[in-house]
Amino acid sequence: AQLLLHTSIIFWILKNSWATWLQMQSVNEEVLDIFRKTNALLQGHFILRSGLRSEYFFQCAQVCQHMSAVTRLIELLAPKLAGLEFKTVLAPAMGGLVVGQEVARQFGSRYIFAEKENDRLVMRRGFKMDPDEPILIVEDVITRGGRVNEAIEIVKAHGGKVAGIAVLVDRSLGKASFDYPLVSLLQLGFPTYDPADLPDHLKGIPAIKPGS
């Protein structure tokens, strides 16, 4: 009887883990489909800001043209944010503006943003934070996490408390690390190549520099 009970428990765990995995795959496919349809995910031969080459390029600004798509992406992200308690959303300009505002709208939260001044993010326009006010930092994409780290410092400097970080796409391949919970809708990493060592299938495709 004890063996049967253990077997039933194992079966239940495997069954629910499989169901969770299938659900995650379904969400990932829907997200990728939205990115493809809005031309946010491009395939070709691209010159990255680092000078390296890639077969894929992700431009989140493309999807942010279509608010119905942004609304759906945040609906898919929202369940992952359920465990975070926050009063205000802070978005770094420019990439996080549209995404951050939609997160705030769906959660009924206050929305503020940080913008560049002398090549550094600052909080202007009379925005303030209450002491220990829980702040969710929202960004569209992270690669190295530089803008997020600047946003974290802004929260600390203004007396707030970082509740967590939410991004649509984490393409850091695990290299971006923070002292706060990081929630991403999709983890997306593509191989990059030195121009002098391109794979054969890219050599015949003209390289373009799409911008960031």
Image: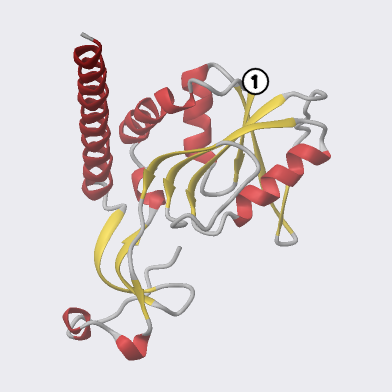
Q: Nearer the viewer, residue 69 or 84?
A: 84
Residue situated in front as seen by the camera: 186 or 111: 186
Residue 124 visible at all: no
Left or right: where 29 falls relative to 111: left
x and y, in percent, of residue 22 in the image: 20, 32
Q: 92 above or below 7?
A: below
Q: Is residue 30 visible?
A: yes
User: What secondary structure is found at the residue carrying circle 1?
Assistant: loop
Q: Which residue is mark 1?
A: 87
- Coloring scheme used: secondary structure
Mark 1 surroundings within 10 Å by alpha-carbon count, few (fewer than 14), some (14 through 19), many (20 or more) = some
Q: Is residue 28 above or below residue 54?
A: above
Position of the N terminus, as image quadrant, is: top left
The amino acid on which the numbered mark 1 sits, given as a three-letter code, is Lys
Q: Is residue 91 left or right of residue 204?
A: right
At horizontal 34% and vertical 29% (from top left) the residue drawn is 76
Name the residue: 25% across, 23% down: 10
Where residue 83 appears, as percent x and y from the top left, is 52, 21
Residue drawn at 43 percent across, 57 percent down: 173
In the image, residue 112 sits, relative to residue 207, either above or below, namely above
Q: Position of residue 19 (x, y in %)?
A: 21, 26
Residue at coordinates 53% horizontally, 34% vertically from top-left? 100
The answer to which image quadrant residue 63 occupies is top left
| Quarter of the picture holding the C terminus | bottom left
Where is residue 165? Give x, y as percent.
57, 38
Q: How many marks?
A: 1
Q: Outermost residue toward the top?
A: 1
Q: State whether residue 40 is above or below residue 82.
A: below
